[in-house]
Amino acid sequence: MRITTSQLYDNLLQGVQQQLNIQNKGNAQITSGTRFQTPAEAALDYRTSLDIRHAQKSVDGGIEAIAIAESRLAVSQNHLNNMGNIFSRAQTLAVQQASGQISSIDRQAAISEITHLTTTMLNNANQKWQGQALFSGTAVDKVPFVTNAFNAGTAVFAAGANTSITNISQTANPSAVNDTYAVTLDAAGTSIASITNSLGTNLLAAPVPLVAGANAVTLSNSAELSITYNGTPDTVNQAGGSLTVSGATAAGSVSYAGSDQDRVVTVNPSLQITSNIRGDDPAFTAAFQALQDFKTALQTNNIQGVTASIGALTAAGEALIDITADVGARIDALQITKTSYEDMKSHFAIRLSTHEGVDIASVVTEMKLSEIALQASYSQISKLQNLSLINFLG
């Protein structure tokens, strides 16, 4: 079979193109640091790279979620520590004020200080992080705790079996008590034998004789009721009905106005982390109530009330310490999880580098060999061109 000059020339050009491709590929690999840049170069390897990068993205998202939860809890813990310090001072103040030897000047100074401590407590409880309330649950745009004006509450009467009591209403509630009062008549049906609260405690100092019409009754908690008696005794049924009071708030008392839902961050589809402390935790209610009761006892010069406040303030402070410790435990757990995710991030980075990374020394060697082959091809083409010219002239 005769090989023509044209065939030789075409073969040499193909060889040149092959070596040029090797040179271009080598330059691209050295520039990018990777073995391939497009799916066409290595479809299976490219798909593997995409899978690794997808895993990296998930890990990065988990690390970001952990960082958010950790930061939010750390800021919350700082304010909880401040609250704990407030109660340490309030307890000390209560112990000092429980002495009967305290002067009126010292008492007024204590009232001023407890007012300041309550304000500081409220400020810490209403703190924000990144423009969002810390302790209001998912209602991040709301102030978690609000100071109430006095409200006597709403009273609802429920008739009992006794037919002589036609209505019960509340006429005064100076202590802003929310409770349910059950009225019981004596066997003769002419006197109120007892009025008990939801705990079963009788709030009457003595039975109250009934007259036809409205009967004013003052309870031991200072609430005042009006009980309407029709004048006809019911000697069969003693249950005179009940009155439920709700929505009562004392002036200066503090109420929670946030959400009952937690703020949750998703680390991965199977791991969700609660990243907040909600203000409707009973510890907050007890804390504000203890401060208010202590202030009231100071204002009324109630030594017994001041003494009782020592225990209430101590219990409230311990409850806040428990919450703070819980937050600390959560942060510790998050740090362990974060370390695990950072290890995964390093693992995927190494795996991707190993999978995509190019052996520069090997590529350079291949390019040098390709350069030699390319120069040889150019030399052969030059000789072939000269030979073709001689044949043409001959």
Image: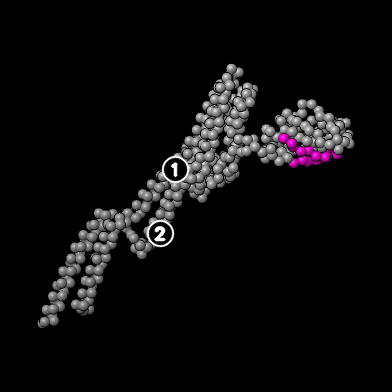
Q: Is residue 20 magenta?
A: no
Q: Is the residue marked by circle 1 packed among few (<14), some (14-19), or many (20+) residues within 10 Å?
A: many
Name the residue located 59 percent from the left edge and 42 percent from the top edge: 257
Q: Quadrant of residue 193?
A: top right
Q: Which residue is mark 2?
A: 47
Question: What distance separates the C-alpha of mark 2 from that of mark 1?
Answer: 28 Å
- Magenta residues span 156-172
Residue 340 x, y percent position in the rendering: 44, 43
Query: In the image, what residue type sits under mark 2?
Result: Arg
Residue 332 x, y percent position in the rendering: 47, 37
Name the residue located 22 percent from the left edge and 78 percent from the top edge: 1
Task: For residue 259, say whether it is visible.
Answer: yes
Q: Are marks 2 and 1 in contact (CB under 8 Å)?
A: no
Which type of secondary structure does the marked residue at label 2 adopt? helix
Tell me the number on the disc at residue 338: 1
- Residue found at the very far front of the displayed protein: 105
Q: Nearer the viewer, residue 283 or 244?
A: 244
- Horizontally, residue 61 falls left or right of residue 122, namely left
- Observer-side mark, 2 or 1, equals 1
| Relative vertical location of residue 256 with respect to residue 299 in this rendering, above or below | below
First reached walking from the N terminus: tag 2 or tag 1:
2
Query: In the image, what residue type sits under mark 1?
Result: Lys
Residue 289 x, y percent position in the rendering: 61, 32
Name the residue located 76 percent from the left edge and 35 percent from the top edge: 225
User: What main secondary structure does the magenta stretch of the protein show?
Assistant: strand
